[in-house]
Structure formats: C-alpha cells, structure tokens
Amino acid sequence: MSEIQVDGYIRVPKGTMIYPTGDGVEAPATRDQVVKVADIFDVDVKSDNFYLLLPDEMRLRYFEASGGKRPIDQDILEFTDRLTKGDYRAVAWSGKWALIADVQPAEAPANAKTARKVVKPEKKPLTKQQQMVIGSVWRFIQDTELRYKVRNPTYAVMRDDLDRGLHELSQHARAQALDTKLSELGIIDHIDEPWGPVTAGETFSVRGKLTSGFGGGQDVPMLFRGEKFTLPYASLEPFVELVNGPSS
C-alpha cells in the first residue's frame, strides 16, 4: 500500500469522524469519498488540535494540566492513544481534517488525472486572526468592556444524563436527539461572562493559541493566552490592532 503524503489522495470511509479547520463541530462522514491531501500535521499533546479529540469531561483537565505545566492525566493519554491507534497525525483537505489512522491511501480519481492545471490565485493579505501568532504584540484601540463565553456545567451534566438513555441510536442520531432535547429544555452549552475593562493603548503579547473549531461556532475560552488574560479571538478582534508581528 502506498504511503499517505501531501498532494496525494486518500479514501475517507463513511462514518469517519471529520473535524473542521475553522468554526464548526466534528461529525461523521456521510459517504465514502476520495480527496486530495493538502496537509499532514501532528495532533499530539503539544499541538493546537489535540484537545479537539477529547470528550468534554476530559477537556477541562487537559487545559488545567497544559496551562499548569503538570503531567497530562494517564486516562487522557490512553483514550487518545486508542482513538489515534498510536499514530498522532492528521490529514487535511478543503477546510476539513481527520485522523490519519482512519483513512487509507487512494488512487487519484479519473477527473483529477485529466484535469488541466489550475492557476493558483493571487496570495491574499493575512487576516487579523492569521496575524495573531505566538509572540505577536497587540494594542487595544479603544476603551471597552471585554466579554467571553465559558462552558455551562449544567449543560455537560444534563447531556450525560440524557445520553445514557440513547445508546440504541447511532452516534449521529444520538447527537441530534441530544441537541434537540437540550434546546427544548433551554439549556445552552456556553454562558456569556464579563471579563473586565481595558483601556485604549494597553498592549499584550500572545503566548499561546488554540483552535476554535468546536462548540457549534461559539466563542471558546482559552483561544488565546495573553500575559494577563485568556480570551477567545471574537472577544478581542474588534478592539485590537497589530503592533509587532507578521503583516503579509
């Protein structure tokens, strides 16, 4: 069997868990498909995407461990080792990615073999979010009251309670049933909280960055770790400008 590599092709079987590279939630593939590999990257404990592999009850413990520089709990490592089949890599294509252990190498589809070479589009300037890399320095451009969203503990408890009665359903059907029931009960997964005021001219540097690709597109706490605070990108973006960092 040939090796999976960038610009090669892979088969993504129906039911494979697919993760978005931007906002959104993971979901199983609804059909078999052959796609071209755009990137291969790590999903181990040192990567930005590791926490996306974890169930809700493990995420908080993982954040506390990685933020506090203490060892990751063994059950988290055992869970991800089983999930990844020991290969902590992922493959990305068209705004999506999956664990490399869940896909197989494939031949290019017939239409790809005969397609004419596509001219690459002109390189676009970096967005503010792309510029917000580790080590970049930012300035608040106005006085404002920052807010953020945190996980609602009641949501996780209620979801677990409801989930126990739905094991006869498939994973996708169970997720839909849970979302519908929680919505009917008026229980939301994130709670809006005030962080506090900032003053125009105040600066901060980005110490770390996590992907915001879970929570149904909601703001995700701990997206950026500044020197004095942890806030999601959406809470900062309207009020900051780049002082020092990548500009193109």
Image (cartoon, helix red, strand yellow):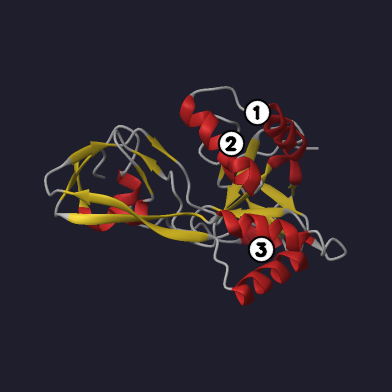
**Callout 1 secondary element:** loop
Is residue 121 among the parts visible in the rendering? yes
Looking at numbered disc 2 in the image, what kind of residue is underneath it? Arg
Q: Are marks 3 and 2 in contact (CB under 8 Å)?
A: no
Mark closer to the observer (3, 2) = 2
On the rendered structure, is 204 left or right of 78?
left
The spot of residue 13 in percent (x, y) is: 78, 55
Location of the C terminus by quadrant is top left
On the rendered structure, is 211 left or right of 193?
right
Q: Which residue is mark 1?
A: 73
Is residue 42 among the parts visible in the rendering? no
Q: Are marks 3 and 1 in contact (CB under 8 Å)?
A: no
| Mark closer to the chain start, 1 or 2 | 2
Q: Are marks 1 and 2 in contact (CB under 8 Å)?
A: yes
The spot of residue 7 in percent (x, y) is: 59, 45
Q: Which residue is mark 2?
A: 61
